[in-house]
Image (spheres, helix red, strand yellow):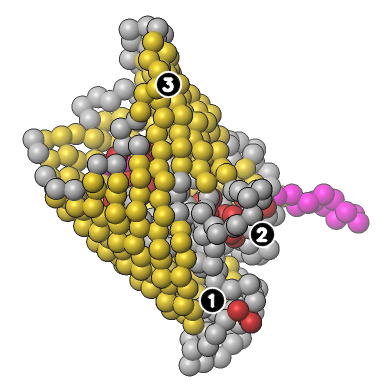
């Protein structure tokens, strides 16, 4: 069972935002190293380095109980200067350094098995010690039995719910950085997730996909449930479902994704002192719709989602175990809503993409009370432009992003000239990628 409550913000954001081989490999040509007697072995990968300059407001650390929305820059107040930041970093990118290995087996003319083991390095820090532990993450380890009657996939894989928004995110940030999640560390980055798009994450799951008929396909997954601080019981597994449409009409290609998820979590207390025990259950749910249209070198993609108990980036988000964003201190789920979109034009190796998104968080009654325990995220928005140029297996990238965060005003604090309930940041960078 995945328990997100134990994650620190640094790990949660870094681990919550990388679309690995499931999407990066579509732009690559897998290298087959062995193919004989029905067995084949191939590899795919990416190495990248990006320079990024960050200018803007520091985190509003006047309140240490911020629930969600933080892009950490300082370890303490003494690390700030005039409540602003100017930082330069070398980063590994939104997808980051990765390598994947696959072993395929043909069982019969109509049945074969595919597999993938995907390994990621979470950063390219300037850690000059040669024998210190490096952050390596085994992102995916799955096998899929492909038959004329559908495909059964099992193991650890990129999730189904919210993968539709991932298709839109990689239009801009397949070869870039975007929001770096944690701006004082060289981790993998968040692209534009958190300001509209949602991250599917990597889950232990068993998934069935129907054959495609008239462009339509249905997928259903039984997923290891997510839990959080204070809500650790999961009587049933999580269920993810998708209906998608993928069809070409001459030079045009149209794709639609309709996705949903349901995860039931609960908390109980034992009887004590003659008092009866308590039991509280919540249904974490989400629904997402995404559409992408390609015509010649033009592509337009966008969509929206809504759900309770989701978070800004991942389902059941609890990057701060003491102050989870998914629900308040009374275990009431918060409602989230996000919108996102990108427009892209590709020509002769060049790709220009512009887009943006916005996330809204509806406060609970406790959040709106006269003495809320947290400074809770209200909304986040961003807009961006990226430009890439591909030469053979090398991709050069330049980008700009403007990111803005608002927190719900604490009625116990008077507003000041610095507006401590908001943060605006500008991210600018250039990078180079080598892919195979």
**Residue located farthest toward the right when viewing the structure as drawn:** 273
Report the Cα–Cα distance between label 1 and label 2.
Answer: 19 Å
Q: Earlier in the sequence, mark 3 or mark 2?
A: 3
Tell me the quarter of the image containing the C terminus.
top left
Residue closer to the observer: 326 or 132: 132
Verify CB contact (< 8 Å) between mark 1 and mark 3.
Answer: no
Q: Which residue is mark 2?
A: 321
User: Of the residues tagged 1 and 2, which is closer to the observer?
Assistant: 1
What secondary structure is the stretch in magenta mostly built from?
A: strand
The residue labelled by disc 1 is 59
Horizontal placement of 216 versus 268: left or right? Answer: left
> What residue is pinned by disc 3?
41
Q: Which residues are magenta?
A: 256-278
Q: Secondary structure at mark 3?
A: strand
Is 226 on the left or on the right of 256, as rendered? right
Q: Is residue 92 left or right of residue 410?
A: left
């Amino acid at each position: 069972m995945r328990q997100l409550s134990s994650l620190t913000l640094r790990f949660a954001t870094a681990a919550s935002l990388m679309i690995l081989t499931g999407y990066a490999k579509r732009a690559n040509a897998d290298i087959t190293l062995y193919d004989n007697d029905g067995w084949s072995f191939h590899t795919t990968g990416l190495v990248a380095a990006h320079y990024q300059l960050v200018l803007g407001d520091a985190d509003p650390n006047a309140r240490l109980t911020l629930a969600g929305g933080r892009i950490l820059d300082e370890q303490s107040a003494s690390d700030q200067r005039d409540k602003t930041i100017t930082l330069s970093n070398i980063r590994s990118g939104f997808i980051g350094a990765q390598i994947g290995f696959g072993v395929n087996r043909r069982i019969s003319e109509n049945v074969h098995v595919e597999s993938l083991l995907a390994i990621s390095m979470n950063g390219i820090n300037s850690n000059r010690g040669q024998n210190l532990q490096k952050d390596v993450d085994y992102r995916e380890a799955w096998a899929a039995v492909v038959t004329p009657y559908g495909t059964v996939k099992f193991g650890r894989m990129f999730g189904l719910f919210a993968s539709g928004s991932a298709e839109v995110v990689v239009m801009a940030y397949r070869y870039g950085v975007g929001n770096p999640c944690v701006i004082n560390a060289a981790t993998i980055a968040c692209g534009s997730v958190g300001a509209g798009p949602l991250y599917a994450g990597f889950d232990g799951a068993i998934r069935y996909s129907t054959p495609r008929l008239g462009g339509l396909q249905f997928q259903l997954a039984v997923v290891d449930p997510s839990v959080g601080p204070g809500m650790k019981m999961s009587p049933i597994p999580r269920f993810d479902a998708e209906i998608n449409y993928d069809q070409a009409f001459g030079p045009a290609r149209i794709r639609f994704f309709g996705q949903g998820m349901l995860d039931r979590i609960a908390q109980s207390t034992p009887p004590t002192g003659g008092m009866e025990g308590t039991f509280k259950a919540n249904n974490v749910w989400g629904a997402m719709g995404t559409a992408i249209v390609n015509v010649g070198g033009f592509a337009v993609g966008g969509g929206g989602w809504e759900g309770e108990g989701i978070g800004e980036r991942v389902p059941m988000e609890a990057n701060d175990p003491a102050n989870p964003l998914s629900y308040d201190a009374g275990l009431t789920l918060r409602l989230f809503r996000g919108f996102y979109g990108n427009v892209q034009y590709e020509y002769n190796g060049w790709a220009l993409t512009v887009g943006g998104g916005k996330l809204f968080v509806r406060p609970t009654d406790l959040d709106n009370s006269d003495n809320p325990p947290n400074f809770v995220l209200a909304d986040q928005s961003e807009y961006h432009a990226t430009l890439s140029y591909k030469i053979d297996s090398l991709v050069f990238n330049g980008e700009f992003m403007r990111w803005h965060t608002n927190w719900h005003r604490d009625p116990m604090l008077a507003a000041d000239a610095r507006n401590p309930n908001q943060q605006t940041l500008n991210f600018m960078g250039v990078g180079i990628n080598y892919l195979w």
